[in-house]
Amino acid sequence: MANEPSGPVPPPPAGPGPWRSPLNRSLDTVWKFIENRAGIKTWALRGQPAFTFNPSYWTGAFVATAFLVQVLTGLLLLLYYVPSASPAVAGAPPQAWASTNYIITSVPMGWLLLSSHLYGAYATIFLAFVHFFRGFYTGVYKPPRELSWMVGTLLLVAMLGMGFTGYLLPYTALAVGATNVGISLTLSVPTLGPFAARLLISDGTHQGLLSRMFALHVVVIPLALAGLLYAHLSLFESHGIAPKATSDPRAKNTFTEEDDKKVGRFFPKVFLYMTKWGLLYVGMLLLIAAAWPWQLPVYFGSTTGAASPEPDWYFLWLYKLADFQYVTPAVAVGVVTALVVFVLFLPWIVQILPWLDGGKRRHPRDRPAMVFLANFLVSFFILMTIWGGIMPGVQIPATIYGTYIAILVAANAVPLLILYPLYKSNYRRRLLERELERKSAAPAEGLVRAPTPLPSAPRPTAAPANQEAAPRA
Ligand code: HEM
């Protein structure tokens, strides 16, 4: 461009520019005061290591975002919902159902709001499972994140509790039936069962049950979730994000100097990254809710359309388990309890049995037994959910489910048994080749070159000795 001035760019004019208006300066002063007194930059508005800008490192943040959307849509629904199991006038549907129907038919955009809350619940629970399995596959429960894992497990249980209690609120025949199945499962647990069930059913009336579920859904569990989330995020802040898991046998799972240097600042990097995903989530949720608005099933007590009890998808596997021959409700609850206890104490179990989980290694390639377990759990969950969806309440003989489980075990174990030794020998060969290449590239005069620094040397900064803290911005 011929008429563009050449030479050094002149400095911006001195004095207040449009960006330094009195309003901007006042806002700046207020913000600086808040920053200074609350130290926000050192906790909430921290930067993140550059390598974490990949959705797999943000699964927990996605769950938190989805949960936040649930809180907002839930609060709006609370403006119209009436938690009463009795009809407003004799012969009318229960008010809980009628008010839900009113939201759908008469509140402006109410149908969209209700559908968003319902699909949002599915998404939150789905994302929580993704976050959980991501942690399982990458071994993030290993020291020093044992407590983060345990609090996370409690969060997952509380999230499922939100799903269970919320399901009854529209007071449909389907929901009342499914809730009763859940309560009879709880009742079957020796000693604790009747006590827990009594907490849920109150005085045994329909209203007692609905009131308890409502209180649990809108007050008790959200408060527990808030406390647990606070603990979870505080623990996350003190340990920082887990470093990249590496399968290089010579490297440790710690931050490298390189990682320490490359940090994405909170603004604009982290802020825009999360805003992008958050907006995408809200957009997708609204799109799905608008395309497939939820149809309210018939109310409890209606004489039209008998409905067999059916829970939401995330409990279908448990309902199907109770259909298995020899699996009494007590056994089904026992299996679930054992699973939860196993997950809760997983960080300690693998410390007692380090051979089971590759010792301190975190990369899935070094932990074939855990990969097998995770693959088995995912495939078992998918199979049971589909089964529960297409054949609810149908008894399954032991020979049939035994065969299916044996097929699942074989389908997950055989590829691992074949691939793992192949991978190991291939990996050793590649390591050896690299070592030879390095030696042949060394100076020929017989000088021994210092070994190349490991890709993940321990952090040089003053992090506590027992942990691999994330770099702070
Ligand atoms: C259900 C609600 C949950 C929420 C809202 C939540 C939220 C978060 C957030 C925001 C993080 C920061 C890193 C990231 O964004 O991924 C995180 C990390 C973590 N979460 Fe969760 N989480 C939940 C459930 C769980 C569950 C079920 C587990 C496992 C049982 C778990 C275990 C962990 C661990 C170990 C970390 C540290 C991971 C790392 O450093 O890479 N969380 N969580």
Image (cartoon, rainbow, N blue to C red):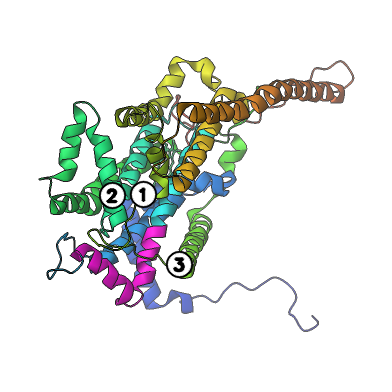
- Which residue is the site of mark 1? 310
**Which quadrant of the frame does ligand 1 lie within?**
top left
Q: Which residue is mark 2?
A: 177
Q: Quadrant of residue 466?
A: top left
Q: Nearer the viewer, residue 389 or 117?
A: 389
Residue 103 drawn in magenta = yes
C-alpha distance separating marks 3 and 1: 25 Å
Q: Nearer the viewer, residue 249 or 387?
A: 387
Residue type of the residue flagged with mark 2: Gly
Asked whether, in this view, residue 261 is left or right of residue 220, the answer is right
* Residue 251 lies in quadrant: top right
Label 3–label 1 contact, CB within 8 A: no
Q: Nearer the viewer, residue 104 or 117?
A: 104
What is the quadrant of the N terminus in the image?
A: bottom right
Identified by mark 3, the residue type is: Leu
Q: Is residue 340 magenta?
A: no
Dot 3 and dot 2 residues touching (CB under 8 Å):
no
Neighbourhood count class around disc 1 (C-alpha, 10 Å): few under 14, some 14–19, many 20 upward: many
In the image, is 462 to the left or to the right of 458? left
Looking at marks 1 and 2 on the same chain, the residue that comes earlier in the sequence is marked by: 2
Residue 212: tell me if it is visible. yes
User: Assess mark 3: CB under 8 A from ligand 1?
Assistant: no
138 over 171 or under it: above or below: above
- Mark positioned earlier in the residue sequence (3 or 1): 3
| Residue pointed to by mark 3 | 286
Q: Main secondary structure of the magenta part?
A: helix
